[in-house]
Image (cartoon, rainbow, N blue to C red):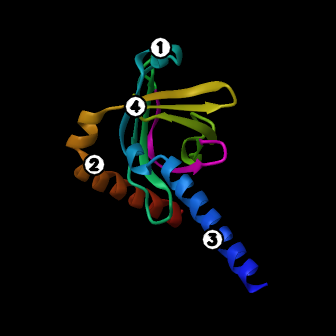
Amino acid sequence: MKCGYIYTMIAIVLAICVVVIIVLIMRPRQCELSGFWEADDSYKEQANLTDFYMYIGKVGKDGRFPGYIFMVDVNENMLFNQPVHFDIKWNPFRRIWDWKCGDAKDVMPESMRMEHNQDDHVIELFSDDTLHAKLIRNNKLSHICKPDVRKAVTKIIEEDDGEDEEA
């Protein structure tokens, strides 16, 4: 009787360990999302944009990523130019990233599906079958400016959050 109980407990513990290891191995690294991203030329043409840049900082203590979005249309109108917070979570069951950014809901949906091609350093943001952004990581800019930009963006976001609390 005790022997069967012990084997059952060992089997359960081993099964849990195997599941955790598989999820950790299959989970993409969040650190690969940090950096500067710029829109693909063909996407900018399709979306009638001249500029579309996004900065994604390192994940914060609250689990969100600080960031910045800059968008200009073909008529030179500034569509968006401000700091934002991204809520980016890996969904292991669907093998995709769930993307939320309520700060930019004026220019893109609040919730989207993010596909991240780690080999080509490309992020695509979708709602249903509609492509809302195709961004390519700018490695030069991401590596050159990393410490200073992260501090600057964090400072802008903290100042922006302070203004929201005063209002």
Main secondary structure found in the magenta portion? strand
Q: Name the residue under label 4.
A: 119
The secondary structure type at the circle numbered 4 is loop
Q: Residues within 10 Å of mark 2 (few under 14, many from 20)?
A: some
Marker disc for residue 13: 3
Q: Which amino acid does label 1 sit on?
A: Glu
Residue drawn at x 24%, y 42% is: 143
Residue 67 in percent (x, y) is at 42, 47
Q: In this view, does 150 lie above or below 94?
A: below
Chain part drawn in magenta: 78-95
Contact (Cβ within 8 Å) of mark 4 with mark 3: no
Q: In this view, does 4 lie above or below 17?
A: below
- Tell me which label, 2 or 4, sits earlier in the chain: 4
Distance from label 1 to label 2 (Cα)? 28 Å
Task: For the C terminus, give its image quadrant.
Answer: bottom right
Q: Which amino acid does label 3 sit on?
A: Val
- Tell me which label, 3 or 2, sits earlier in the chain: 3
